[in-house]
């Protein structure tokens, strides 16, 4: 990539969001774009997370693009290797390889308000783009808590998303920190080979059985020969989850039945009443992400496993000290402590029209318009932005909705013509987020009595969407020009922003007049 190369669109990241954006751009007839990927292959979080037992907790036929169905999923809940292979297949099928720049980490992005374009500095040089689509995703940068003494631990330390496959856990004393979605898959996978496995649990999760099975050859044959059967399967999975949304967002008390199922799941394997009490959550199910596993509790009941009902507070040499004073000897520490979700590092690398970073603009909490655009950052869009996460369904549904929004955003820029940018009005951003937060108050995520990774430092849920995926699809079907201002280039530099709706109407009127003449 030469210096100062210019493209119409620069997409950051090559996971589901980035590859989906690339496919949608091509379908819109836009081929002047690049996908900038910091790693040496595509796949996003499904490339980075390769820990033992890594799999999706959303059914396979729902965790794939509607425009790229896969009739050959081997299991109802697919493993990491199959999902990563699917993303490689998407890149090949839709001829995206020529657009993808591997090993191109984005170091900084600056909005040039005179030229109305983004200047992007990467690890391999610089380029400019009219539009930036940030698809780095919230599960890309691991979060390891600051633990006194950790730097002096003599053994092995790594995060679940940076698994060290060269380190042999057999016969080792292993400490697993955290009880999230990754941890409950890792624990049963490494328990048989560890000499001792100690789980540090700050808060116990609610765990439902994972109804996983191999998809039969007959089913796969049927989906290949009659594609509508795969679509129907996907539709059924989607519909069931849409019906569940109101219990999470409006009537949390209806989740009691689900709690009883989770307790029975625990009771089948955990016979020790002391351990069962230690593993029973004190908050309403759904307040934290509901986890799926049929192997987690059986693993915890094994004699070489110890559950410490407290977080890791200090490391003294090879001795790990919990917040309750419990001491444990360990040879290896594995952190399953999640990601930087509410303070995404990419925000520190985006400098907008006012000369401040997105992280500075979001210092009091992330805010965007329809989960996509941010005030002060023209022609910049994020996939899986603030308040687009889900607690019970597939993120691919939300990604595809945002791709619809991206497509219409590009159409509006084309209608405007010339060098132009769309800037989200601060009032529109604030109005959208005020309504989202008002709806959030009724949800189990706010009223369920827990402190989850969904919440930011101020206690606001800036992560999840408080409605159905169908609602979000309707809200992002097209760009509402009344929510934007148009900025154009003049001889004196960028012109003052004007009303986007009026600007487009003016362009369309001029085009109509030209057609009459």
Image (cartoon, grey):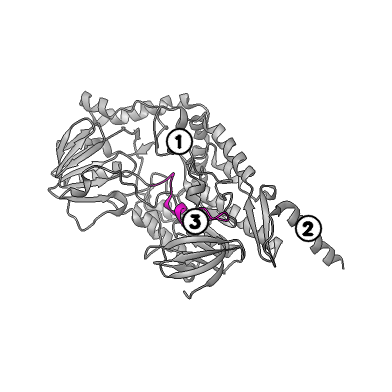
Q: How crowded is mark 1: few (under 14 residues within 10 Å), some or many (20 or more)?
A: few
Q: Which of 111 and 449 is in front in this view?
A: 111
Q: Which of 378 and 95 is in front in this view?
A: 378
Contact check, label 1 and label 3, Cβ < 8 Å? no
Name which of mark 3 and mark 2 comes first in the sequence.
Answer: 3
Read off the residue under disc 2. Answer: 506
Residue 458: numbered disc: 1
Residue 350: numbered disc: 3
Q: Position of residue 188 (x, y in %)?
A: 24, 43
Q: Is residue 408 visible?
A: no
Left or right, residue 110 beside residue 301: right
Q: How crowded is mark 2: few (under 14 residues within 10 Å), some or many (20 or more)?
A: few
Q: Is disc 3 placed on a helix, strand or loop? A: strand
Q: Is disc 2 placed on a helix, strand or loop? A: helix
Residue drawn at the location 62% of the way across and 64% of the way down: 114
Q: What stretch is highlighted in magenta?
A: 340-356
Tell me the mark number nearer the camera, choosing from 3 and 2. 3
Image quadrant assignment for residue 89 = bottom left
Q: How far apart are marks 3 and 2 (CA)?
A: 32 Å
* Above-or-below relation of 18 to 453: below
Image quadrant assignment for residue 429 = top right
The answer to if 365 sits in the magenta stretch is: no
Name which of mark 1 and mark 3 comes first in the sequence.
Answer: 3
Left or right, residue 289 beside residue 190: right
Q: Position of residue 153 (x, y in %)?
A: 17, 48
């Amino acid at each position: 990539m030469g210096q100062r190369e210019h493209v119409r669109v620069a997409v950051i990241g090559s996971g589901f969001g980035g590859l989906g954006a690339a496919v949608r751009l091509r379908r819109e007839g836009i081929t002047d774009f690049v996908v900038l990927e910091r790693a040496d292959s595509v796949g996003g979080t499904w490339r980075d997370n390769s820990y033992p037992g890594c799999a999706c907790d959303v059914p396979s036929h729902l965790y794939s693009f509607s425009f790229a169905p896969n009739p050959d999923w081997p299991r109802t809940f697919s493993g990491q290797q199959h999902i990563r292979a699917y993303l490689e297949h998407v890149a090949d099928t839709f001829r995206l390889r020529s657009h993808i720049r591997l090993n191109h980490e984005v170091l900084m992005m600056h909005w040039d308000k005179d030229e109305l374009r983004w200047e992007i500095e990467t690890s391999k040089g610089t380029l400019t783009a009219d539009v930036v689509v940030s698809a780095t995703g919230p599960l890309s940068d691991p979060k390891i808590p600051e633990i006194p003494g950790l730097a002096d631990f003599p053994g092995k330390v790594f995060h679940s998303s940076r698994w060290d496959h060269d380190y042999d856990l057999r016969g080792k004393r292993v400490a697993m920190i955290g009880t999230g979605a990754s941890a409950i898959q890792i624990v049963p996978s490494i328990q048989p080979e560890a000499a001792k496995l100690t789980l540090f649990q700050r808060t116990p999760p609610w765990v439902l059985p994972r109804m996983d099975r191999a998809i039969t050859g007959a089913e796969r044959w049927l989906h290949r020969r009659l594609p509508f059967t795969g679509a129907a399967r996907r539709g059924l999975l989607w519909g069931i989850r849409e019906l569940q949304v109101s219990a999470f967002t409006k009537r949390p008390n209806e989740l009691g039945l689900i709690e009883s199922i989770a307790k029975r799941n625990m009771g089948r394997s955990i016979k020790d009443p002391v351990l069962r009490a230690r593993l029973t959550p004190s908050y309403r199910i759904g307040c934290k992400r509901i986890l799926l596993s049929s192997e987690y509790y059986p693993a915890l009941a094994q004699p070489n496993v110890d559950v410490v009902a407290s977080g890791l507070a200090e490391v003294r040499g090879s001795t790990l000290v919990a917040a309750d004073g419990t001491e444990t000897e360990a040879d290896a520490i594995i952190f399953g402590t999640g990601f930087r979700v509410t303070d995404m590092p990419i925000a520190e690398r985006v400098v907008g029209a006012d000369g401040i970073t997105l992280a500075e603009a979001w210092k009091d909490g992330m805010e965007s318009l329809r989960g996509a655009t941010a005030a002060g950052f023209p022609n910049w869009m994020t996939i899986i932005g603030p308040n687009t996460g889900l607690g019970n369904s597939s993120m691919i549904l939300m990604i595809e909705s945002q791709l619809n929004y991206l497509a219409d955003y590009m159409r509006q820029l084309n209608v405007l013509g010339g060098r132009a940018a769309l800037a989200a009005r601060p009032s529109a951003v604030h109005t959208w987020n005020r309504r989202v937060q008002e709806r959030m108050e009724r949800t189990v995520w706010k009223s369920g009595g827990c402190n989850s990774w969904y919440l930011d430092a101020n206690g606001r849920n800036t992560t999840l969407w408080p409605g159905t995926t169908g609602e979000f699809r309707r809200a992002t079907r097209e760009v509402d020009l009344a929510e934007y201002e148009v900025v154009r280039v003049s001889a004196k530099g960028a012109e003052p922003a004007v009303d986007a709706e009026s600007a487009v109407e003016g362009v369309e009127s001029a085009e109509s007049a030209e057609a009459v003449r």
